[in-house]
Image (cartoon, grey):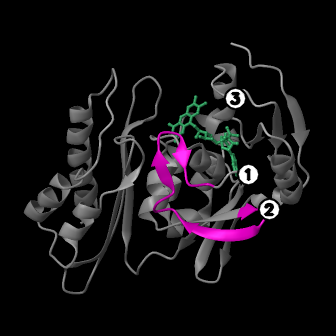
């Protein structure tokens, strides 16, 4: 299908993008266009104007700022997958980015676009939840930092305020000795996660778990932290029985999503199995 006619403006600064978002009613930002353009072609989105932020160099790239790693919102999936600093410090982020779509999508799609789009099966959503990321957001009123936890509210629904630009995503250094993994069960046709599990585990000197993060995408109405699984692991030795017990709690309180390919019950089961395998990989 062909998108409805729209006006196009290339923003030369974040301030200009914010002004256009404020002044006109039906405006959409576009970054890599890998989610917005398909929606426009299906006429599920019909903005009157799109504001292209794709060439704002200040929003691109990876840098260290003190104790944190900062990834500009316009950094592509391919760059996240290949960046040496990210591969060293937050490898599960690079791993998740490397599993997105195909090379064309990874070369155009951006970390910011993926998180703001809010697809319930976005690979990077699980990664930012497991890594305790912070989202840097700018509105007409100024800039603020928001935790990734609580950002994903439902299918295509995030906590990004109206008229805001996501400028960067920042990551704390993981605890010493932490191990990380991203596991994805990809839909055979679309490649999206039927279930994707991001896990990070750090052990104390006595062999007990002192830090655990498990996040799941694709399975529920929105990506979520498997908090009950994390709590089950904390302070205990991760024996196979304990890992299985933790995984059995991964879906506690979650409304699983069902579709023609995978029922809600199947996704619940996949979640349990892949949380167990992810944690087992790490121990
Ligand atoms: C064939 C195909 C396969 C794919 N497979 C996968 C997959 O396996 N896993 C996966 O996770 N994703 C997949 N995707 C989606 C892909 O990751 C997109 O790149 C991503 O979801 C959107 O990033 P974008 O930069 O292209 O955003 P755009 O499409 O440009 O924008 C998406 C939305 O975010 C908003 N937006 C963008 N940037 C900002 C910003 N900085 N601040 C505020 N709002 C912003 C836009 O207004 C729009 O609403 C696939 C896409 C395609 C086309």
Q: Mark 2–mark 1 contact, CB under 8 Å?
A: yes
- According to the picture, the residue beneath numbered tag 1 turns out to be 163
Check the image and report above or below for 223 versus 135.
above
Q: Mark 3–mark 2 contact, CB under 8 Å?
A: no
In the rendered structure, which disc, 3 or 1, sits on the residue that comes first in sequence? 3
How far apart are labels 3 and 1 at the CA level? 19 Å
Assign a secondary structure to mark 1.
loop
Residue 182 lies, in percent from the top left, at 39, 53
Please tell me in which quadrant of the rendered image residue 51 appears. Answer: top right
In the rendered structure, which disc, 2 or 1, sits on the residue that comes first in sequence? 2
Q: Is residue 92 visible?
A: no
| 18 in the magenta segment | no
How far apart are labels 3 and 2 at the CA level? 26 Å
For disc 1, the neighbor class at 10 Å (few under 14, some 14 to 19, many from 20) is some
Rendered-image quarter of ligand 1: top right
Looking at the rendering, the stretch of residues picked out in magenta corresponds to: 138-160
Residue 4 lies, in percent from the top left, at 77, 19
- According to the picture, the residue beneath numbered tag 2 turns out to be 140
Q: Nearer the viewer, residue 65 or 221?
A: 221
């Amino acid at each position: 299908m062909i998108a409805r006619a729209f006006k196009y403006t290339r923003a030369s600064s974040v301030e200009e993008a914010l002004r256009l978002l404020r002044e006109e009613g039906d405006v959409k930002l576009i970054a890599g266009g890998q989610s917005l353009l398909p929606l426009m072609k299906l006429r599920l989105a019909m903005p009157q104007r799109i504001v292209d932020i794709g060439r704002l160099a200040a929003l691109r790239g990876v840098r260290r700022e003190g104790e944190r790693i900062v990834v500009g919102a316009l950094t592509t999936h391919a760059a996240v997958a290949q960046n040496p600093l990210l591969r060293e410090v937050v490898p599960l982020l690079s791993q998740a980015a490397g599993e997105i779509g195909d090379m064309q999508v990874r070369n155009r799609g951006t970390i910011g676009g993926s998180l703001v789009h809010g697809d319930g099966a976005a690979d990077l959503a699980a990664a930012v939840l497991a890594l305790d990321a912070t989202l840097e957001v700018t509105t007409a009123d100024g800039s603020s930092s928001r935790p990734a936890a609580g950002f994903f509210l439902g299918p295509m629904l995030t906590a990004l305020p109206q008229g805001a630009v996501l400028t960067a995503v920042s990551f704390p250094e993981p605890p010493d000795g932490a191990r990380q993994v991203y596991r994805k069960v990809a839909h055979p046709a679309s490649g999206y996660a039927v279930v994707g599990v991001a896990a990070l585990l750090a052990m104390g000197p006595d062999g007990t778990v002192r830090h655990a993060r498990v996040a799941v995408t694709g399975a529920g109405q929105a990506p979520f932290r498997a908090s009950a699984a994390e709590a089950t692991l904390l302070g205990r030795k991760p024996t196979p029985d304990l890992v299985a017990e933790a995984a059995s709690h991964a879906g506690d309180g979650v409304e699983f999503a069902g579709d023609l390919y995978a029922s809600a019950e199947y996704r619940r089961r996949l979640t349990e199995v892949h949380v167990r395998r992810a944690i087992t990989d790490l121990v």
